[in-house]
Amino acid sequence: MKRKLFSAMLSAFALLLLMGAAADIDPAYALVAEEESPVSQETELETEAQLPDELPELEDLGNPIPETLPEAVGESKLLINGEPAPEGISRSVQKGTTYVALDVLAQQLEPAAQISWDGSTITVVTDKLTMTAKVGQLYVVANGRYLYVPEAVQLTQAGQAAVPLRAAAEAFGAEVGYATDTGVATVTSGSGAILSGDEYYNQDDLFWLSRVIYRESGNQSLEGQMAVGNVVLNRVADPAFPDSVEGVLAQKNQFSTYKSGVLRKTEPSEASIIAAKLVLDGGVVKETRGALFFDCNSNSWAARNKQLIATFGDHNFYG
């Protein structure tokens, strides 16, 4: 009986010693033991990520793949008839306007185009189009149409004539598009040429507009003359004024040279005719956009009653 009691006491003492030893395990050893298990689990999770049981549907991600990715056209992000534009197109942006080398774009849109370049002026000729652009000039001419280039025709570092992409595409009767989701600009061939000036310009409007531009601003810069032409066309478009160029000029107390007959007898300069064609073709001088009145007299009715928009050249323009 005593032996059994002693054995039981000895077993209990041994158990107490073991429990104390477990409590005194080296903390560093315990830390290593804790880190070993997650490493094994992490390896297991990586394997699961590489080989999932079932791939999620793309729609569930909320990011469906676009039909055309920006990477598909490289850095240029410009497609011409569905193909990436060649590097030689020298695409650049001037004050928010995209410029391209005219010779390269012309060859892409019409491979048979005849192109001549004298270092200053480029001429492009196809069976439907004759187009010229001179470096530094504020317009390009296409089939007798005058298309405004506010930042002028540029000269690239490669020695090419660069023009706004939209102006060049318009000359070729092509369409320009831009996808905001992909950042890709596109040019798509159309009719092959812009409608000629003889067909496009209303000759009566051109007659009167070129003459009033010359009489009112013939001594101004090309854009100064355009700004005066813009005022006349702004009135034509405004329901408060007559709906034709001649009607605006004939309005009471407005253009005295019309009533006196002087305007009809006036011979406009070449620059005034060009300015008239530029504004008839949609060219707008941004500094005076929206103006309905102009003068060169600080004591005029417009100066006293209308909001000054800008002073451009020798004229003040009012809204």
Image: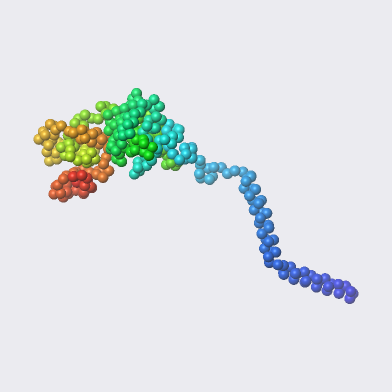
Image position, residue 287 (x, y; %): 26, 45
| 101 left or right of 315 in image | right
Name the residue: 21% across, 39% down: 225
Q: Quadrant of residue 200?
A: top left
Is any part of residue 166 visible from this angle? no
Image position, residue 276 (x, y; %): 22, 35
Q: Which residue lies furthest to the left in this view?
A: 260
Name the residue: 12% across, 38% down: 256
Q: Which residue lies furthest to the bottom in this view?
A: 2
| 249 left or right of 183 in image | left
Image position, residue 98 (x, y; %): 37, 40
Q: In which quarter of the image is residue 127?
A: top left
| 122 left or right of 266 in image | right
Asked whether 92 or 318 is in front, the reply is 92
Q: In which quarter of the image is the N terminus?
A: bottom right
The colour mode here is rainbow
Image position, residue 197 (x, y; %): 27, 29
Name the residue: 22% across, 45% down: 312
Name the residue: 32% across, 31% down: 118
Q: In which quarter of the image is residue 187?
A: top left
Is any part of residue 102 visible from this angle? yes
Number of marks drawn: 0
Asked whether 165 or 270 is in front, the reply is 270
